[in-house]
Amino acid sequence: MPERRVVRYALVDVNQMRQSVQVSDDMLKQQYQTNIQQYQVPNRVHVEHILFMTVGKTTDAEVEEVRKKAEDVLKQVKKGGKFEDLAKSTRKTRDLKTKVVT
């Protein structure tokens, strides 16, 4: 199951805030040092993708072929296939088809 993340955000008028708040550099440094744990990021997410190009595909059949290839790779990953190997294989296949020989 893919990992899910929750995102929260707020819209702030920076110009309005700057006019109403005065903070010295010393105050900022003190606040940062006092709460340094809040600024540390313990976990990072590593994201990988395989790009299946449909640009230049002029028919629905061509786009459908690309979609089927993408679904096949996804099935292999879900069955435990090594993502890196699948990405390399997909990239090599795409490069061979688009390679220009002069």
Image (spheres, rainbow, N blue to C red):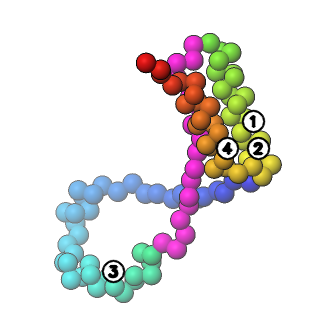
Judged by depth in the image, the label closer to the viewer, 4 or 3, is 4
Which numbered disc flags the more N-terminal residue, 4 or 1?
1
Residue 36, position as x, y percentages in the image: 40, 82
For mark 2, give the secondary structure: helix
Which label was assigned to residue 72? 1
Contact between marks 2 and 4 (CB within 8 A): the answer is yes
Crowd tier of the residue under label 3, counting other residues whose Cα lies within 10 Å: few below 14, some 14–19, many 20 or above: few
Residue 59, position as x, y percentages in the image: 62, 12
Magenta span dominant secondary structure: loop
Judged by depth in the image, the label closer to the viewer, 2 or 4, is 4
In the rendered image, the quadrant that contains the C terminus is: top left
Contact between marks 1 and 2 (CB within 8 A): the answer is yes
* Span highlighted in magenta in the image: 41-58
Figure check: 59 above or below 28 = above
Which label was assigned to residue 83? none
For mark 3, give the secondary structure: helix
